[in-house]
């Protein structure tokens, strides 16, 4: 099944040179390769009533669909609706229903596609998450639960734990997003404020057989971090969550601190860990990841006549600092031909972060990455970066594209304006004025950030 084509607003204008066109082509190919329609077609098959799941790494697993009383699809995330839509025709008469929560809906006949919001949870997301939990709790020992797990699930499956309210979750999420904490540490907190995350959805579905299908937006594909690991053992604790709040100065509500402290004092049950009975009949398979996008982008680079190099799928840290390293790699290639001869395209994935200034403006990690790289570049190169879900930060842009002439005395953006924008985390307006933003709308998938730096011959 072919994935829908990714459309970029004013693509022809943005691709004004061969290098720019190549950068955009790489990004588009990467996003399209990770779309659930293509992923499900590549990783799953049903033949003679048997479902075979082939993960991106490891051995395939087979499940006899006819041996279960009911086959249900449950989960959430940015791409969960599209996963559900792709699973319906594949499972056919074996499917008995289910529900997923998403902010990017898709048409389905049997699986409920319920609304939620990202990156900050909402009331409708709470209601939808409770519906998913209810269906999980109804699953019996002879049922099969296929768990759709994709990026964004942490916000889209909120389900506040204990006496916590949605307002408590919203305030904590906003503070975490502004703190610069990496996703694994953010999710250590969110798992302990939720009734669905950190293996608790698997616990709810137990003793049903649970087969998780994960589209990873996490560096290293840590199953406990993707969507906060609803079907996976949780290696973190209440103490870890409290430590994150303290180390990053997260201004969470007092009710959140009290909830976490009660858990640390043994007054609340911990999230299930490895060896818990909830996981005796549970397996989670990563069916797409950053590598899915990177390998597709690498193929396009080769086809266009560029030497491709995948720098890393696990780039993390502050977006502005990661950009400087990428710019330095591009300059080295242009100047010396190391580690690859130009013309070349350097590709990377992962997730960078932004620690917001108190009076911050508008933007996102990928916009800051591009603006910072353009400010640094001293080589004939194009830098482009997107969040593969089509939404960078809380803006209508997926990311941006620039070259070594975008910032400077003769460029669309002055050095002083670029530096001021970065200092205030306000990259969006200056990139918009420079006609450098990449707008795709919701892409239907999420394997996190994807970057392409095209280096021409000096």
Image (spheres, rainbow, N blue to C red):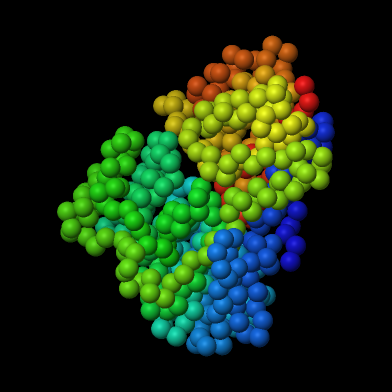
- Give the percent coordinates (x, y) of residue 42: 68, 65
Camera-nearest residue between 146 and 435: 146
Rendered position, 78 above or below 142: above
- Give the percent coordinates (x, y) of residue 28: 72, 46
Camera sees residue 429: no
Residue at image point 65% right, 78% down: 46
Rendered position, 27 above or below 18: below
Camera-nearest residue between 278 and 168: 278
Q: How many marks?
A: 0
Which corner quadrant holds the C terminus?
Answer: top right
Rendered position, 324 above or below 267: above
Residue at image point 38% right, 79% down: 207
Rendered position, 228 above or below 393: below
**Quadrant in which residue 313 is drawn:** top right
- Give the percent coordinates (x, y) of residue 115: 53, 60
**Quadrant in which residue 457 is drawn:** top right
Residue at image point 48% right, 66% down: 284
Residue at image point 78% right, 38% down: 306
The reply, left or right, for residue 245 in relation to residue 115 is left
Which corner quadrant holds the N terminus?
Answer: bottom right
């Amino acid at each position: 099944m072919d994935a829908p084509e990714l459309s970029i607003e004013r693509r022809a204008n943005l691709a004004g040179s061969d290098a720019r066109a190549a950068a955009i082509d790489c990004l588009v190919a990467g996003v399209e390769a990770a779309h659930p329609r293509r992923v499900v077609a590549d990783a799953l098959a049903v033949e003679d009533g048997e479902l075979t799941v082939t993960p991106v790494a490891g051995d395939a697993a087979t499940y006899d669909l006819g041996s279960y009383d009911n086959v249900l699809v449950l989960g959430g995330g940015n791409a969960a609706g599209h996963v559900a839509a792709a699973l319906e025709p594949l499972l056919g008469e074996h499917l008995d229903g289910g529900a997923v929560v998403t902010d990017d809906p898709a048409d389905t006949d049997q699986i409920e596609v319920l609304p939620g919001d990202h990156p900050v949870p909402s009331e409708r997301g709470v209601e939808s998450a409770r519906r998913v939990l209810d269906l999980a709790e109804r699953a019996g020992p002879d049922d099969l639960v296929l768990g759709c797990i994709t990026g964004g699930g942490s916000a889209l499956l909120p389900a506040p734990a204990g006496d916590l309210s949605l307002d408590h979750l919203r305030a904590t999420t906003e503070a975490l997003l502004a703190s610069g904490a990496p996703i694994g540490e953010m999710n250590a907190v969110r798992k302990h404020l939720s009734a669905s995350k950190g293996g608790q959805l698997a616990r709810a579905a137990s003793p049903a057989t649970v087969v998780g299908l994960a589209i990873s937006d996490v560096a290293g594909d840590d199953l406990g971090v993707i969507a906060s690991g609803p079907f996976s053992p949780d290696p973190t604790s209440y103490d870890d969550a409290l430590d994150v709040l303290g180390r990053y100065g997260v201004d969470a509500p007092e009710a959140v601190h009290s909830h976490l402290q009660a858990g640390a004092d043994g007054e609340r049950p911990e999230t299930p860990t490895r060896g818990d009975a909830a996981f005796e009949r549970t397996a989670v398979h990563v069916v797409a990841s950053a590598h899915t996008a990177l390998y597709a982008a690498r193929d396009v680079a080769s086809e266009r006549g560029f030497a491709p190099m995948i720098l890393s799928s696990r780039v993390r840290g502050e977006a502005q600092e990661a950009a400087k390293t990428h710019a330095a790699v591009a300059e080295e290639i242009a100047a010396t031909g190391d580690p690859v001869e130009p013309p070349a395209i350097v590709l990377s994935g992962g997730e960078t972060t932004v620690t917001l200034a108190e009076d911050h403006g508008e933007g996102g990690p990928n916009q800051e990455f591009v603006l910072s790289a353009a400010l640094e570049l001293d080589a004939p190169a194009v830098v482009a970066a997107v969040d593969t879900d089509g939404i960078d930060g809380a803006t209508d842009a997926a990311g941006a594209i620039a070259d070594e002439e975008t910032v400077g005395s003769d460029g669309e953006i002055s050095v002083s304006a670029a530096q001021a924008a970065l200092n205030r985390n306000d990259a969006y307006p200056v990139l918009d004025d420079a006609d450098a933003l990449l707008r795709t709308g919701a892409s239907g998938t999420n394997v996190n950030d994807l970057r392409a730096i095209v280096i021409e011959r000096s």
